[in-house]
Amino acid sequence: MRRAVYPGSFDPLTNGHLEVLQTAAQLFDEVVIAILVNPDKRPLFSVEERMQLIAEAVKGIPNVRVDQFQGLLVDYIRRIQAHVIVRGVREPADYENEVKLAHMNRSMEPSAVTVFLPTHPTLSYVSSSLVKQVAAYGGDVRAHVPECVAVALRKKYMNTP
Ligand code: PNS
C-alpha cells in the first residue's frame, strides 16, 4: 500500500490544496490529509471545523481520509506507516523553504520522502491567509475555495446563517 500524508494547517482548505490532493490521490493508494494541531497558533477554524470542512470537500475522492496530528510530522508518519509526504508548491519561493523542511524530516526519518506538487498555475496566488483577508471584508471567495468553505467563511465573518 503506497500511503502518502499531505500535512498542513488548512485554515481553511483552498481550491489550491484540493487540486494538490486530487493529484496526490491519483499517484498514491491512500492519501491522508493531516491537520497540524498547533497550540501556538490561534486558527480561524478549530481543528474539528477544519476536519469537517475537508471531509465535506473530499467526499468525492474515495482514497483520501482526514486526520489530525500533534508534534513532529515524522513521528506521525511512522505511526500511520506512511513514507511519502506531499507538499504543494505555488511559486519558486515556496520551494526554498519546503526543501529545508524535507531535508530536516529526512534527517530524522531516512525513509521519509517528500514529493513536491506544483499547484495549478491558475491557483498559484490562492492561499488560506489571502482568502481569509478577502472574506473578512466581505469579498467573494467562491472561486478560490470549495463551496462549504465559502459558506463557513461567510458565517464566521458576516454572522450570516
Ligand atoms: O500549512 P503549513 O502551515 O505550511 O504546514 C506546515 C506543516 C504542518 C507541514 C509543518 O509545520 C509541520 O510539519 N509541522 C509539524 C512539526 C514538525 O514536524 N516540524 C519539523 C519539520 S522541519
Image: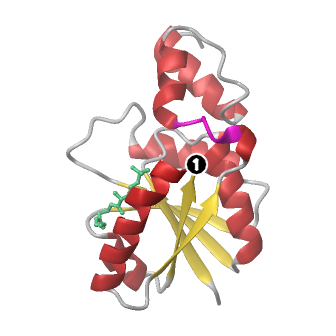
**In the rendered view, would you say 86 is above or below 120?**
below
Q: Is residue 18 above or below residue 158?
A: below
- The image quarter containing residue 75 is bottom left
Numbered range of the magenta stretch: 123-127
* Label 1 element class: loop
In percent of the image, x 55 and y 23: which residue is there?
Answer: 153
Residue denoted by label 1: 90
**What is the basis of the colouring in this image?**
secondary structure
Image-quadrant location for residue 106: bottom left
| Residue ID at (66%, 65%) | 64
Q: Can I make out residue 23 in this image?
A: yes
**Residue drawn at the location 39% of the way across and 30% of the way down:** 44
Count up the numbered dots: 1
The percent position of residue 15, horizontal first and vertical second, equals: 67, 41
Q: Residue furthest left?
A: 40
Question: Where ligand 1 lies, by image quadrant?
Answer: bottom left
Residue 41 percent location from the top left of the image: 26, 40
Q: Is residue 85 above or below residue 50?
A: below
Asked if the stretch drawn in magenta spans residue 124, the answer is yes
Q: Is residue 58 visible?
A: no
Q: Residue 46, percent across and down?
A: 39, 39
Q: Is residue 65 magenta?
A: no
Q: Is mark 1 within 8 Å of ligand 1?
A: no
Q: Classify residue 86 as left or right of residue 103.
A: right
Image point (71%, 24%), residue name: 142
Q: Quadrant of the N terminus?
A: bottom right
How would you rate the neighbour count of disc 1 (Cα within 10 Å): few for under 14, some for 14-19, many for 20 or more? many
Whether residue 81 sits left or right of residue 20 in the image: it is left
Judged by its main secondary structure, the magenta piece is loop
Place of residue 6 in the rendered image (x, y in percent of width and height, measured from the top left) = 53, 64
